[in-house]
Image (tube, grey):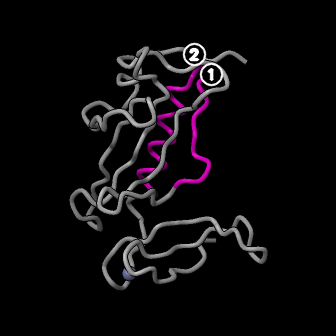
Amino acid sequence: MSVDRFTKAQFEEALPEGRWEPRGVVGNEYVYAIPVTGQRLKEGELEIRVHSSVNARTDVSDGVGENSIRVYLYSPKWHVPVWKKGRWVTRQPGWEDRLLDLLRKAYGLGLTAARCRCGELQATYVSKTWKNPGRRFRKCLSCGQWGGWVD
Ligand SMILES: [Zn+2]
């Protein structure tokens, strides 16, 4: 299956206009952020991170079998993903629309992010225990308080 090759400028054009900010180069690829703002969120508390797969050396997206476009919710304060597992966009034709769909979904999830009694956000993790493999649960970013199963 062929993948689209696109430049940094083309990738930035595919992001929601006026909403994104550059976050430099991580692991040799350009990374972007879309701040999530809502009544339940403090300013700068949560953002969507987008790893573009655009190589910072060549300014073109990586080839087949290399990085996909990845999207996750991120806490700038704690420097950790808040919601992550398996959210990527294949770069076959139409990737721009699929990226926007995923960004909308991530934004919606961000707006409903759960909060711990201590006031901090809870992150969603995937259980790796033998009893509950693959099951999602929440845990506070600050105090580590259990926040319950998501499903
Ligand atoms: Zn807490």
Q: What stretch is highlighted in magenta?
A: 84-109
Q: Residue furthest right?
A: 130
Residue 126 versus residue 55 in the image, above or below: below
Residue linked to disc 1: 92
User: Which corner quadrant of the image does residue 151 belong to?
Assistant: bottom right
Q: Position of residue 84 (x, y in %)?
A: 53, 54
Q: On the rendered structure, is 148 left or right of 18? A: right
Q: Measuring 52% from the left and 73% from the top, which residue is drawn there?
A: 138
Residue at which label 2 appears: 4
Vertical placement of 7 versus 42: above or below? above
Q: Can you give x and y, in whole percent of width and height, for residue 59 in the image?
A: 41, 16
Tell which of 24 and 112 is nearer to you.
Answer: 24
Q: Which amino acid does label 1 sit on?
A: Gln
Label 2 element class: loop
Residue sitting at 52 percent across and 66 percent down? 124
Crowding at mark 1 (Cα within 10 Å: few <14, some 14-19, many 20+): some
Mark 1–mark 2 contact, CB under 8 Å?
A: yes
Residue at the location (58% across, 72% down)? Answer: 137
In the rendered image, the residue lying farthest to the left is 43
- Ligand 1 image-quadrant field: bottom left
